[in-house]
Image: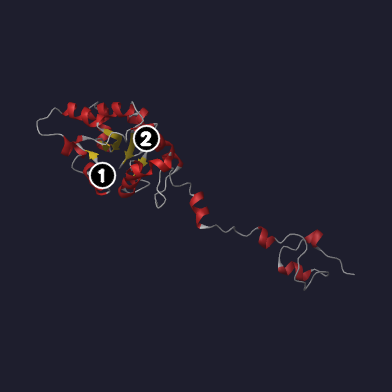
């Protein structure tokens, strides 16, 4: 009787099996089916989403399509709790927008306009500080009357921090509480850490990862009161 050569040579292919004096021509292989063992696994759409690391937040509505990274979830969770605690004060703005003065007619206004188009009320110096009003006092009032703050970090903002301007005062007030979300635009977290190690130690949102529209969607969902009952 012909002996099978699998223990020595293995049947790793159909040609090897065909050349075996014992198994040649048989459809069944001896031992492992290597073609199956080394085939690429198939993934469902849900698995692909999981492998990317992004997922919906606890405060997301059932129909939401907004996805967050684990770092974003860690950063935004205490901010969301702050939002919940301040929901009983309906006269508050949803967001206080902290920005460099030189960005007020550019990217700061762009972000403000997108947020307001999504139904978010925003304290914005360009519209909330009356001509001739004491700027520092108006900023204090804006911080008090807002549920959460966002800091728009741009190259101009980093220069403002280095000069210890008004942006630095706003930043200190926001850092004192869990109501701060850095939005990094046209710069990097490395540059932010060099200018402000404290602010740079916090994760936030970045236009490197998301468009300004997508960032505004995350902020809008963060301050939406309709999802509070689900979140709790």
Using residue 120 as the reference point, say whether residue 200 is left or right of it: right
Using the image, tell me which numbered label, if any, was put on residue 111.
1
Which of 5 and 118 lies nearest the eye of the viewer? 118
Q: Nearer the viewer, residue 175 or 1?
A: 175
The x and y percentages for residue 36 are: 66, 61
Query: Taking 98 as reference, is 48 above or below it?
Result: below
SS category of the residue bearing label 2 = helix
Q: CA distance from mark 1 to mark 2?
A: 19 Å
- The mark total stands at 2
For this orientation, the residue located farthest to the bottom is 25
Residue 86 image offset from top left, x and y in percent:
32, 33
Asked which quadrant contains residue 69, the reply is top left
Residue neighbourhood size for the residue with mark 2, other residues' Cα within 10 Å, grouped as few (<14), some (14–19), many (≥20): many
For residue 165, the mark is none
Color encoding of the figure? secondary structure
Give the quarter of the figure containing the N terminus: bottom right
Mark nearest the camera among 1 and 2 is 2
Label 1 sits on a secondary structure element that is: helix
Specify the farthest residue to the left: 132
Image quadrant assignment for residue 185:
top left
Q: Earlier in the sequence, mark 1 or mark 2?
A: 2
Quadrant where the C terminus lies? top left
Q: Is residue 198 above or below residue 221?
A: above
What percent of the width, then of the height, locates residue 2? 87, 69
In this view, 87 is above or below 1: above
From the top left corner, tell me how far across and down residue 152 is, in percent.
28, 38
Q: Which residue is mark 2?
A: 79
Work out whether residue 64 or residue 74 is closer to the camera in this orientation and state it: 64
Q: Nearer the viewer, residue 174 or 187?
A: 174
- Taking the spot 65% from the left edge, 58% from the top edge, the residue there is 38
- At x 46%, y 41%, the residue is 70
């Amino acid at each position: 009787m012909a002996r099978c050569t699998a223990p020595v040579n293995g049947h790793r292919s159909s040609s090897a099996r065909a050349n075996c004096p014992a198994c040649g021509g048989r459809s069944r292989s001896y031992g492992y089916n290597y073609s199956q063992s080394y085939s690429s696994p198939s993934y469902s759409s849900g698995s692909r989403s999981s492998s990317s690391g992004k997922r919906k937040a606890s405060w997301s509505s059932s129909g939401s399509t907004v996805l967050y990274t684990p770092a974003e979830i860690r950063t935004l969770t205490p901010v969301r709790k702050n939002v919940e605690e301040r929901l009983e004060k309906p006269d508050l703005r949803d967001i206080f927008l902290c920005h460099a003065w030189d960005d007020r007619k550019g990217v700061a206004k762009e972000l403000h306009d997108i947020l307001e188009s999504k139904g978010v009320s925003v304290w914005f110096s360009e519209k909330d500080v009356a001509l001739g009003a004491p700027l520092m006092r108006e900023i204090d009032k804006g911080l008090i009357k807002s549920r959460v703050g966002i800091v728009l970090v741009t190259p101009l903002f980093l220069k403002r921090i280095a000069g210890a301007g008004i942006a630095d005062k706003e930043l200190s007030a926001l850092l004192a509480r869990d109501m701060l979300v850095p939005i990094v635009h046209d710069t990097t977290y490395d540059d932010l850490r060099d200018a402000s190690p404290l602010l740079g130690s916090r994760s936030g949102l970045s236009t490197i990862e998301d468009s300004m529209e997508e960032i505004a969607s995350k902020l809008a969902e963060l301050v939406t009161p309709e999802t509070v009952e689900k979140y709790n």
